[in-house]
Image: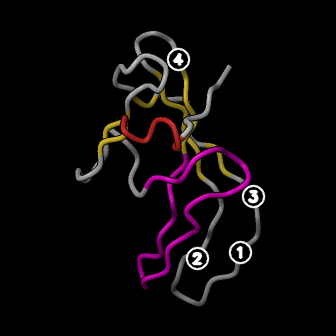
Amino acid sequence: MIKHFDWKKNNYKFLMGFKSPKLFCPECGEKMKDIGAGESMTMVAYNSPPGHNHDDNCRKRVYGCENGHLLTISKRNRCPACDWVGKEDCDCHYGKKYDEWPT
């Protein structure tokens, strides 16, 4: 069963200040890493100006720790051509989106 990270209770386990943040298991405190299951994405149609990418579909990955705990997280989208930034959270998963995938 995939557990979702409760940001209000466990945000102290997420270390900011790095280009790629570190992610720690909310269950046991061990470092988590991408389990290599690929990405899933919602399929909502978004319209972007020519030359821009304002696609705010939710991209998700599954991370796991050495003790077998799993966690689904999402990354916030950004347009490389302008200052547009996708929404910070959505209805398809719990918690706020990351600005970079954790390492």
Q: Is residue 18 above or below residue 70?
A: below
The residue drawn where x is 72% and y is 54% is: 42
Quadrant housing the C terminus: top left
Closer mark to the observer between disc 2 and disc 4: 4
| Residue labelled with disc 3 | 43
Q: CA distance from mark 2 to mark 3?
A: 14 Å
Tag 2–tag 4 contact (CB < 8 Å):
no
- How dense is the environment of label 2, judged by Cα within 10 Å: few (below 14), some, or many (20 and up)? some
Q: Secondary structure at mark 2?
A: loop
Region in magenta: 74-98
Residue most extreme to the bottom: 50
Q: CA distance from mark 4 to mark 1?
A: 34 Å
Among the two numbered marks 4 and 1 on one chain, the one whose residue lies closer to the N terminus: 1
Is 68 part of what is drawn in magenta?
no
Instruction: Report x, y in % for residue 71.
Output: 55, 30
Type of the residue with mark 4: His
Closer mark to the observer between disc 4 and disc 1: 4
| Residue labelled with disc 1 | 46
Q: Is residue 13 above or below residue 86?
A: above
Q: Secondary structure at mark 3?
A: loop
Q: Is residue 94 above or below residue 65?
A: below
Instruction: Report x, y in % for residue 70.
Output: 55, 23
The disc placed on residue 54 is 2
The residue drawn where x is 55% and y is 70% is: 86
Among the two numbered marks 1 and 2 on one chain, the one whose residue lies closer to the N terminus: 1
Q: Secondary structure at mark 4?
A: loop
Instruction: Report x, y in % for residue 21.
Output: 31, 45
Tag 2–tag 3 contact (CB < 8 Å):
no
**Along the viewing direction, whichever of 38 and 70 lies nearer the viewer:** 70
Among the two numbered marks 3 and 4 on one chain, the one whose residue lies closer to the N terminus: 3
